[in-house]
């Protein structure tokens, strides 16, 4: 049984049945792994895996002013969502340009929107959004009645069609960052792994049946451990690690998500961003020496010190990789030194993502570093 | 959980195997590898290095986390297990067989101060709530 102080998803008892090692993740009792994090990672890269991401909060946004309100609330511009079902990744900023959360917002055909926010920031986000509703005519509805399963990997489409044949026609031409509705499901071609796949939002009461059906089709259950190494290889930011309330998207590798084109759009944080001169950038690191890079390790560069924001062992590359906030003048290809237990380890600054669709995006690695 | 009765243990989850020549080999327990998850890196002390009981002398890292290895006894490092450095995943499949290094204790009597299997079991089971 989960500790009573923790929140549980509709799949909690299924995870426990499968022998998952459960952990407290931001107040939620969630699976870390089901035996081997590495096997789960490999399944997602090579076949198909599934994650319970029901701890993330789905918020439905309705009302005449939904679009205008989101254009005020978010640093990316929902006016770009020209076709129904399109999804947009955005930061929600505070007035000083710090990141309150990163999220995905989907446009619905009827002019309403659906947003998915992080679990650990849900209370803070909802309070912030409520506080900024007036004078807009907008209603927010958190959907804790729904569950969300992320089905990811090169075989995700095939497995989805086997589990739900009715979805074949609707999803065969579904492009990345698009969604469709089917019965009481909401199916989006999005994810956090760098692989093809879907995020399926459905009534919580139906989640266990879908999970079991996919399990019977040899889809590998995968936990938060594999989710982290997959997203790191895919070069995707993690809120609270790679950015937070005190960091700007411009220093966090997220300038591409800030839309300044419409000068009349005065979104929260815009003024601060326009006067902000970034001194840092988020860079990829590939460890050349042996060891494992971890968050908060200091990085010495020719232009001063930086810090690792996310680091781990990359199962695909069989080396340690990291995202690091480095002085902005440090170019890709530079050699830097990471202080690991007071020893300087050599790492190369590289562009990221590191891995997409099961393959390394890095140039061939030197072998001379092997000792 | 299986905890071999012929080994000695520390509170920091090292196991110690005594050899007839007076040397010992050191590894991490099955319980420790279960807590850490998939192992990806092992850093051993250097052969010849003198270790002080209770002090950090190496590290094992899983995908998830780094964990220090503490010297269970004071003494000199005789040999390190290169195989386990090359394939740290051995620790996950066979923690009891995956020795990290061997040590010549300064004072053989110090071995008596280590935990026996029953004492270690109590510590490991307390971790399991």
Image (spheres, helix red, strand yellow):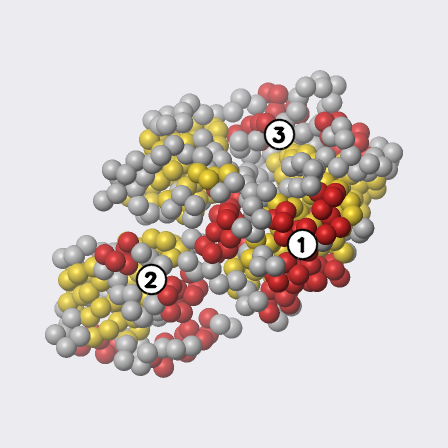
Between marks 3 and 1 in the image, the one whose residue lies nearer the viewer: 1
Which mark identifies residue A162? 1
Q: Is label 1 in a helix, a strand or a loop?
A: helix
- Which chain contains the residue that carries disc 3? A
From the viewer's side, name the closer residue of A209 and B104.
A209
- Which chain contains the residue that carries disc 1? A
Q: Is label 2 in a helix, a strand or a loop?
A: helix
Q: Is label 3 in a helix, a strand or a loop?
A: helix
Report which residue position mark 3 lands on: A257
Q: Dot 3, crowdedness within 10 Å: few (<14), some or many (≥20)?
A: some
Which of the 4 image quadrants contains residue B104? bottom left
Q: Residue furthest left?
A: B21
Q: Tell me the residue at 34%/63% (across/down).
A: B91
Report which residue position mark 2 lands on: B90
Q: Quadrant of the C terminus of chain A?
A: top left
- Residue A310: image location, x then y, percent: 47, 43
Q: Tell me the residue at 80%/51% (across/down).
A: A184
Which mark identifies residue A236? none
Q: Dot 2, crowdedness within 10 Å: few (<14), some or many (≥20)?
A: some
């Amino acid at each position: 049984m989960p500790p009573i102080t923790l929140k549980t998803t509709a799949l909690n008892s299924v995870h426990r049945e499968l022998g998952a090692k459960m952990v407290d993740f931001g107040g939620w009792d969630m699976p870390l792994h089901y035996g081997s994090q590495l096997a789960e990672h490999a399944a997602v890269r090579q076949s198909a895996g599934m994650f319970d991401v029901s701890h993330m909060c789905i918020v439905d946004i309705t009302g005449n002013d939904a679009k205008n309100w989101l254009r005020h609330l978010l640093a990316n511009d929902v006016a770009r969502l020209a076709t129904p079902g399109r999804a947009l990744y955005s930061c929600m900023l505070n007035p000083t340009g710090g990141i309150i959360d990163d999220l995905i917002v989907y446009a619905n055909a009827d002019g309403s929107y659906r947003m998915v926010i992080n679990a650990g920031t849900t209370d803070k986000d909802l309070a912030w959004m409520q506080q900024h509703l007036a004078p807009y005519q907008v209603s927010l509805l958190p959907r804790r009645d729904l569950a969300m399963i992320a089905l990811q990997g090169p075989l995700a489409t095939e497995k989805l069609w086997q589990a739900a044949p009715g979805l074949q026609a609707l999803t065969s031409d579904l492009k990345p960052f698009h969604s469709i509705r089917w019965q009481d499901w909401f199916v989006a071609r999005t994810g956090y792994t760098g692989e093809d796949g879907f995020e399926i939002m459905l009534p919580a009461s139906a989640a266990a049946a879908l999970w079991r059906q996919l399990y019977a089709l040899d889809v590998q259950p995968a936990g938060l451990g594999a989710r982290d190494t997959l997203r790191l290889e895919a070069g995707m930011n993690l809120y609270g690690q790679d950015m937070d309330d005190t960091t700007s998207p411009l220093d966090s590798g997220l300038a591409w998500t800030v839309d300044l084109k419409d000068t009349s759009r005065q979104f929260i944080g815009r003024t601060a961003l326009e006067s902000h001169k970034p001194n840092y950038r988020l860079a990829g690191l590939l460890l050349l020496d042996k060891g494992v890079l971890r968050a908060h390790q200091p990085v010495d560069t020719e232009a001063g010190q930086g810090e690792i924001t996310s680091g781990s062992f990359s199962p695909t590359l069989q080396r340690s990789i990291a995202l690091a906030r480095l002085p902005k003048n440090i170019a890709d290809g530079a050699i830097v030194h990471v202080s690991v237990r007071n020893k300087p380890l050599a790492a190369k600054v590289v562009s990221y993502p590191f891995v997409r669709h099961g393959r390394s995006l890095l140039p061939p690695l030197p072998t001379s570093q092997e000792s | 959980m299986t905890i071999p009765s012929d080994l000695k243990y520390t509170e920091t989850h090292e196991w110690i195997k005594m050899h007839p020549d007076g040397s010992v080999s050191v590894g991490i327990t099955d319980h420790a590898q279960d807590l850490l998850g998939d192992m990806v890196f092992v850093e051993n002390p250097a052969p010849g290095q003198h270790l002080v009981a209770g002090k950090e002398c190496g590290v094992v890292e899983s995908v998830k986390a780094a964990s220090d290895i503490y010297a269970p006894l004071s003494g000199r490092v005789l040999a390190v297990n290169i195989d386990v450095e090359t394939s740290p995943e051995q620790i996950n499949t066979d923690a009891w067989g995956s020795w990290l290094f061997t040590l010549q204790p300064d004072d053989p009597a110090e071995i008596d101060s280590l935990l026996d299997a029953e004492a270690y079991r109590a510590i490991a089971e307390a971790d399991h709530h």
